[in-house]
Amino acid sequence: MMRDGIRRLAASVLRLRGSRRRRQGALKHAFLIGGMKCGTWTMFKLLQAHPQVAASNPKELKFFSRNARDQWHKYHEHFAITPRTEVLLEGTTQYSKHPDTTDIAYKISLYDPNARFIYLMRDPIRRVESQLAHRVARREIRAGAEARAREIERAIHYSMYFTQLGSYASIFGVEQVYARTFESFVADQEGTVRECCVFLGIDQPNEVRALPPQNVRRSDNGADRIALTEAEKDLIRERLYREVLSLEAAFGISTRAWKDFWKH
């Protein structure tokens, strides 16, 4: 009888493991890839509240930029998966920081060719200034004109939204990318979340509670006094003009709300 009990227990464990493997294999993978300083913390928290979404811990998991392919089987360990989970959501903005990261879209396509991507974009003038202040607050750049110019150059690359999105759309197709401006998201958090639910193929929530801004600008190290000069703003407009036009044409994104960029 003891042997029969052990056999039944072993069979139950195997069934449970098999069920878990099938369950995890059926999960959808979604990536909130950016942009940096474009409201991703707020979006992440709003989607995290959905009962069918399991969010990565931490938000900026950076899994596919830190792990070789032989470690990819451990990906699900970073999510609190429940019987109701349908989508695993990672919120790594580093995945849209070309040219600093160049092969993430390809890596994810090897892991899951059906993955979906959410991308928020902000008026480039405001985004560059916010990134500069963020880095100053964290003491990640040195004082001085040369360090400031290098950081603005880096921030301009991160604000090439058409280029950043293009690397994913070219591999996965535009139908697997959801792109929206930060300004329209802030104006209608609920509408954005509900559109994302349709995009991810999950149920509509009963309610969406709008959140205040997350990860706002800090005053550390004088970061709250950071402001771009007119010359720096003109440089950004010149460098990104064709990028913004291409974004509108290729992805149907309206940038009329980018008042600083268009000098409204």
Image: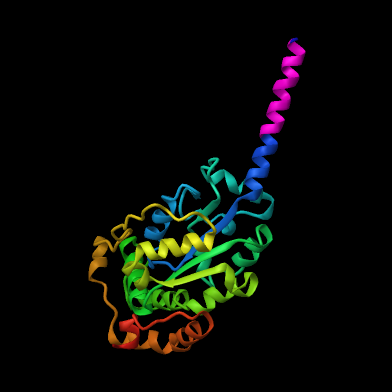
Which residue lies at the image location 73% right of the left edge and 11% below the top edge?
2
**Front-most of 100 and 207?**
207
Q: Main secondary structure of the magenta part?
A: helix
Q: Which residues are magenta?
A: 2-16
Query: Does the magenta-highlighted stretch encompass residue 95?
Result: no
Quarter of the C terminus within the rendering:
bottom left
Which residue lies at the image location 28% right of the left edge and 86% below the top edge?
230
Residue 8 picture quarter? top right
**Front-most of 206 and 3?**
206
**Front-most of 138 and 198?**
198
| Left or right relative to 31: residue 205 | left
Colouring mode (rainbow / by chain / secondary structure / one colour) = rainbow
In percent of width and height, residue 86 lies at: 55, 50
In percent of width and height, residue 166 lies at: 57, 76
| Left or right relative to 95: residue 185 | left
Above or below: residue 227 compared with residue 54: below
Residue 174 picture quarter? bottom right
In percent of width and height, residue 62 lies at: 53, 56
Query: Does the magenta-highlighted stretch encompass residue 10?
Result: yes
Above or below: residue 207 compared with residue 5: below
Which residue lies at the image location 47% right of the left edge and 68% below the top edge?
119
